[in-house]
Amino acid sequence: MPKRLGAEARNEALVTLTGWRLVEGREAITKRFIFRDFSEAFGWMTRVALLAEKMDHHPEWSNVYKTVEVTLATHDAGGLTELDVKLARAMDALAG
Ligand SMILES: C[C@H](O)[C@H](O)[C@H]1CNC2=NC(N)=NC(=O)C2=N1
């Protein structure tokens, strides 16, 4: 199981992640992705889902039309780990 990031590693990761912020009252990061339309949003979710399954690391997310709200945390570790940072970067990359 991955280890929770220390405060320093967490902050370092956050400054390099665009659009991601800490959730209030919980050790997790969140970002709102807005696509051109539903097809773009759901296509992206499909690609992310396949990767998440491969990583065995799964997002909390919801979709309304072209908007996808994502929260990442490592439930097994009770906070943020390198897996969340890795998945966040991959989501950004897949969103173009
Ligand atoms: C048994 C299985 O490996 C675990 O439940 C995995 C699955 N996906 C997961 N996803 C996330 N985000 N956090 C976890 O702790 C986690 N644990």
Image (cartoon, rainbow, N blue to C red):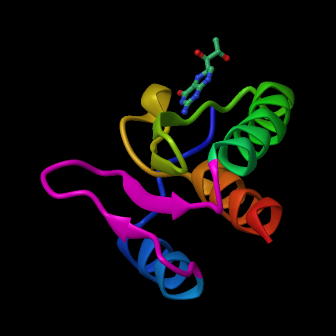
Residue 33 coordinates in the image, percent (x, y): 53, 60
Q: Which image quadrant is residue 42 in?
A: top right
Q: Quadrant of ligand 1?
A: top right
**In the figure, residue 20 lies in which quadrant?**
bottom left
If the image is split into quadrants, where does the C terminus sit? bottom right
> Measured along the vertical axis of the image, is residue 95 above or below residue 40?
below
* Main SS class of the magenta portion in the image: loop
The front one of 50 and 63 is 63
- Which residue occupies 16% across, 58% down? 24
- The residue shown at (65%, 62%) is 36
Q: In screen coordinates, is 10 left or right of 2?
A: left
Which residues are the magenta region? 17-37
Tell me where residue 39 appears, x and y as whole percent: 73, 42
Residue drawn at the location 63% of the way across and 59% of the way down: 88
**Count of numbered badges drawn on the protein:** 0
Left or right: where does residue 27 sit relative to residue 49?
left
Residue extending farthest left: 25
Q: Quadrant of the N terminus?
A: top right
**In the image shown, does 39 or 22 lie closer to the viewer?**
39
- Residue 88 included in the magenta stretch of the image: no
Tell me: residue 13, above or below residue 73.
Answer: below
Residue 2 in picture, x, y percent from top left? 62, 41
State left or right for residue 22 relative to residue 96: left
- Return the x and y of residue 17 as percentages of the image width and height: 57, 78
Residue at 78 percent across and 33 percent down: it is 46
Q: Residue furthest front?
A: 37
